[in-house]
Image (cartoon, rainbow, N blue to C red):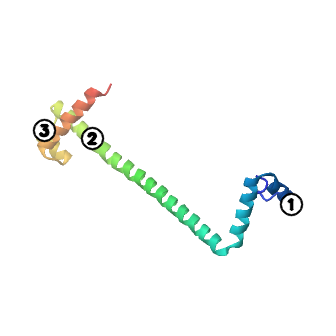
Amino acid sequence: MAYFANQLDDHEREELAMSDAAISGAMDAARVFLADDDERWNYINRQMAILDYNSGIQDSREEGRREGRREGRREGIGIGRVGMLAELVRDGVLTLGQAAEKAGMPEKEFQKAMENLEMSNEETP
């Protein structure tokens, strides 16, 4: 760790390289890497491409979540509206046709939505 943190002097680096073959190999690879400008720029460009890709993925996920929340809100509002109108139909305040018109859907579709709400309410504790 001290080597990579650049906390060793030349003598300490030599001792470290002699004590462990893996460290010696890593130090040799680092020297070769640092000496080759093309290699270093290729590495930097690869790393930047990876960061850009990961950033794009992150942005896409966040946008997907935002869109999902917007869609969920719209759906929830629609379910709430149908539920409120269904209550008014059950209470005799509105006819099925009037409630369907207020919901902006055909009467058969509204009837099916009411039935689905009743079924989902029975399943909810």
Q: Secondary structure at mark 2?
A: helix
Q: Residues within 10 Å of mark 2 (few under 14, many from 20)?
A: some
Q: Which residue is mark 1?
A: 9
State which mark lies toward you, 1 or 2: 1
Task: Give yes or no for contact between labels 1 and 3 (Cβ–Cβ under 8 Å).
Answer: no
Q: CA distance from mark 2 to mark 3?
A: 16 Å
State which mark lies toward you, 2 or 3: 2
Q: Residues within 10 Å of mark 3 (few under 14, many from 20)?
A: many
Q: Which picture quadrant has residue 51?
A: bottom right
Check the image and report above or below for 46 versus 120: below
The residue drawn where x is 52% and y is 63% is 52
State which mark lies toward you, 1 or 3: 1
Depth order, front residue of 81/31? 31
**Residue 37 coordinates in the image, percent (x, y):** 67, 74
Q: Secondary structure at mark 3?
A: helix
The three-letter amino acid code for the residue at tag 1 is Asp
Q: Which picture quadrant has residue 103?
A: top left
Depth order, front residue of 28/38? 28
Check the image and report above or below for 50 versus 67: below
Q: Of the residues under marks 1 and 2, which one precedes in the sequence?
A: 1
The three-letter amino acid code for the residue at tag 3 is Leu
Say the numbered circle drawn on residue 96: 3
Say the numbered circle drawn on residue 33: none
**Residue 75 coordinates in the image, percent (x, y):** 30, 45
Q: Which residue is mark 2?
A: 79
Q: Of the residues under marks 1 and 3, which one precedes in the sequence?
A: 1
The residue drawn where x is 16% and y is 41% is 110
